[in-house]
């Protein structure tokens, strides 16, 4: 039974776009129909709302099935699912108002329904892609300075290995599926305690043994392999990032040591220097507020 429920849940990412598209189309038709020139569009509204409501109901069922696997933040799932159910209910209500020619009610409902769709869709995007997915990679302005979300690394040797080198990689490539919001495979990579705990398949890091650590081994798998991380279609770990992760694990997977405290062999010093130089350039182009 569990397998069937999970199978049904896999259809949610496909079906969820149907009610969004259909209902947004219905709302646009409703807005246009206010003009005498497009008044005939009113005839299409009942069908549009009905199809939107039906697809929303199916989307809700598949969404509930998807949430059954427990890989998502419970509070966020609770909000998303009830907002989704609200979209379905308001769509049906909109259909009823239009059929009964309750124009005033249906007009106000369309505005509220639009807001519901936006909020519900945003929460769905957060569940799928992680918090801040809309602003990822976008520089922020603060106090007249353009600040990048990634930490500025001006001296690689003085940097903390985990906080300044490794964590930004995990945040950029792994948090979307393994953080407080979503825990695919019951695995979180956003805090030390969760990293050390591992996921449903056990410990993911064996200090000193990168090739025996699933956190690293899964990166080496063929992209078409289901165990390959990050999943196909997601931003992939670069060769330099992979080498840094390997180096970090092989040198003990420290969470508090500085770079200079760890042995650096092969190309690690060059990678760190390139990382430092890249960040130095970012510092140089920061905007200075005019006095």
Image (cartoon, rainbow, N blue to C red):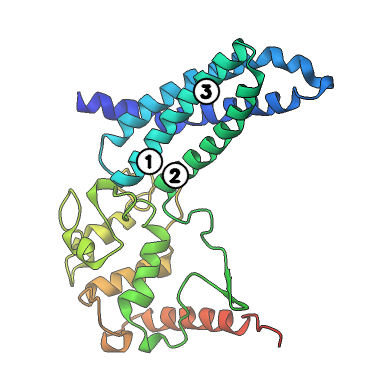
Compare marks 1 and 3 and give the one earlier in the sequence. Answer: 1
Q: Quadrant of residue 193?
A: bottom left
Which residue bears the numbered disc 1? 79
**Which tag is nearer the camera, tag 2 or tag 1?**
1
User: What separation in Å lies between label 2 and label 1 (alpha carbons)?
Assistant: 8 Å
> Toward the viewer: 102 or 232?
102
39 in relation to 215, above or below? above
> Toward the viewer: 197 or 48?
48
What is the quadrant of the N terminus in the image?
Answer: top left
> Toward the viewer: 244 or 20?
20
User: What separation in Å lies between label 2 and label 3 (alpha carbons)?
Assistant: 19 Å
Which residue bears the numbered disc 2? 123
**SS category of the residue bearing label 1:** helix
Q: Looking at the image, do the residues carrying marks 2 and 1 touch, with CB atoms under 8 Å apart? A: yes
Whole-percent x, y for residue 72 in the image: 31, 45
The reply to whether residue 110 is in sight is yes
User: Image point 37% across, 57% down: which residue?
Assistant: 175
Q: How many dots with numbers?
A: 3
Compare marks 2 and 3 and give the one earlier in the sequence. Answer: 3
Whole-percent x, y for residue 53 in the image: 50, 20
9 sits left or right of 89 in the view:
left
Compare marks 2 and 1 and give the one earlier in the sequence. Answer: 1
User: Image point 56% across, 38% down: which residue?
Assistant: 115
Whole-percent x, y for residue 203 in the image: 16, 58
User: On residue 91, which mark appears?
Assistant: 3
């Amino acid at each position: 039974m569990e397998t069937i429920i999970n199978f049904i849940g896999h259809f949610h990412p496909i079906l969820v776009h149907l009610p969004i598209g259909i209902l947004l189309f219905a709302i646009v038709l409703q807005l246009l129909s206010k003009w005498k020139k497009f008044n005939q569009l009113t005839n299409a509204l009942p069908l549009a709302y009905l199809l939107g409501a039906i697809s929303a109901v199916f989307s809700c069922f598949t969404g509930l099935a998807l949430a059954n696997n427990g890989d998502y933040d419970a509070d966020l799932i609770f909000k998303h699912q009830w907002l989704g159910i609200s979209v379905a209910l308001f769509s049906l209500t909109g259909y009823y108002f239009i059929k009964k020619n309750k124009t005033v009610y249906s007009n106000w409902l369309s505005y509220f329904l639009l807001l519901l769709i936006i909020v519900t869709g945003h929460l769905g995007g957060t569940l799928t892609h992680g918090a801040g997915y809309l602003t990822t990679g976008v520089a922020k302005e603060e106090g007249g300075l353009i600040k990048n979300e990634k930490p500025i690394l001006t001296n690689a040797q003085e940097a903390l290995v985990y906080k300044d080198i490794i964590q930004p990689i995990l945040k950029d490539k792994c948090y979307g599926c393994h953080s407080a919001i979503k825990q695919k495979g019951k695995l979180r990579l956003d805090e030390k305690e969760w990293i050390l705990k591992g996921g449903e398949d056990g410990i993911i890091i064996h200090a000193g043994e990168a090739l025996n650590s699933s956190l690293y081994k899964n990166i080496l798998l063929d992209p078409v392999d289901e165990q390959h991380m990050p999943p196909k279609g997601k931003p992939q770990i670069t060769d330099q990032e992979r080498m840094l992760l390997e180096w970090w694990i092989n040198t003990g997977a420290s969470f508090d040591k500085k770079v200079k405290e760890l042995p650096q062999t092969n190309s690690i010093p060059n990678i760190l220097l390139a990382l430092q130089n890249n960040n130095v350039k970012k510092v140089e182009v920061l905007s200075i507020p005019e006095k």
